[in-house]
Amino acid sequence: MKILITAGPTREYIDAVRYLSNASTGRMGYALAEAARAAGHQVTLVHGPTQQEPPQAYKTIAVTSALEMFQAVGDEFPSCDALIACAAVSDYRPRERLSGKLKREAARELTLELVQNPDIVQEMAARRSPRQVLIGFALEAESAEDHARDKLQRKRLDAIVLNAPATIGSDETTITIFRADGRREGPLTEPKSAAARRIVALAEVLLKHLRSLPPE
């Protein structure tokens, strides 16, 4: 099985040294890559900037921005059996990146104009073949289950993994898995390594089911 995994944050540069980002450490995505490789799968890992050394994979692609991740995932997606999209991709980027370093003395106030980045998972869902599995992640703080179920349906995923901001940087996570067929698993609190094995096993089950269906 060829599994494409995204991990870590993206950085959206304002000038040569300042950027917009988030607190993702990449731990969950890296745990997924390790679990998939241990299960004997061919893993392609697309990861943003983190402080950790990425795990070994069949292919590792380091990116910085959301647009770079979008390009890398788009290039690799057609040949994968499953995409597990764990990366914390920035929703917005500055409309213009300033050259050099913006000086504090240049202005007392600064207005930053932002534009939306592509929704990588939704874009891949639009390109998917009937024999590809898509699993997304939802990091939610309020009305968490409602938002996760909405993303599952709106983005046409096979499953979505709900977690919370409190799990960022931790060795443990609390997840709830919602499947497109209505099944639910969790909430479960366990080490990220165990959660990763659970999610990889789910991808295997979902792919086996898809392959059992008659051709369209």
Image (tube, rainbow, N blue to C red):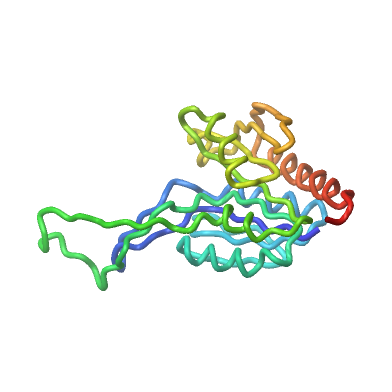
Residue in front for this viewpoint, 126 or 76: 126
Q: Residue at x 81, y 58 (%)?
A: 1
Outermost bottom residue: 99
Q: Quadrant of the C terminus?
A: bottom right
Residue in front for this viewpoint, 94 or 147: 147
Number of numbered labels in the structure image: 0
Q: Name the image quarter holding residue 17.
A: bottom left
119 versus 153 height, above or below: below
Please indicate whether residue 1 sits to the left or right of residue 47 in the image. Answer: right
Q: Residue at x 59, y 38 (%)?
A: 171
Residue 27: x %, y % from top left: 58, 47
Q: Name the image quarter holding residue 62.
A: bottom right
89 versus 56 height, above or below: above
Please indicate whether residue 62 sits to the left or right of residue 214 in the image. Answer: left
Please indicate whether residue 198 sits to the left or right of residue 68 in the image. Answer: right
Q: Residue at x 53, y 53 (%)?
A: 8
Residue 57: x %, y % from top left: 70, 62
Q: Residue at x 75, y 52 (%)?
A: 36
Residue 107: x %, y % from top left: 11, 59
Residue 102: x %, y % from top left: 20, 65
12 versus 182 height, above or below: below
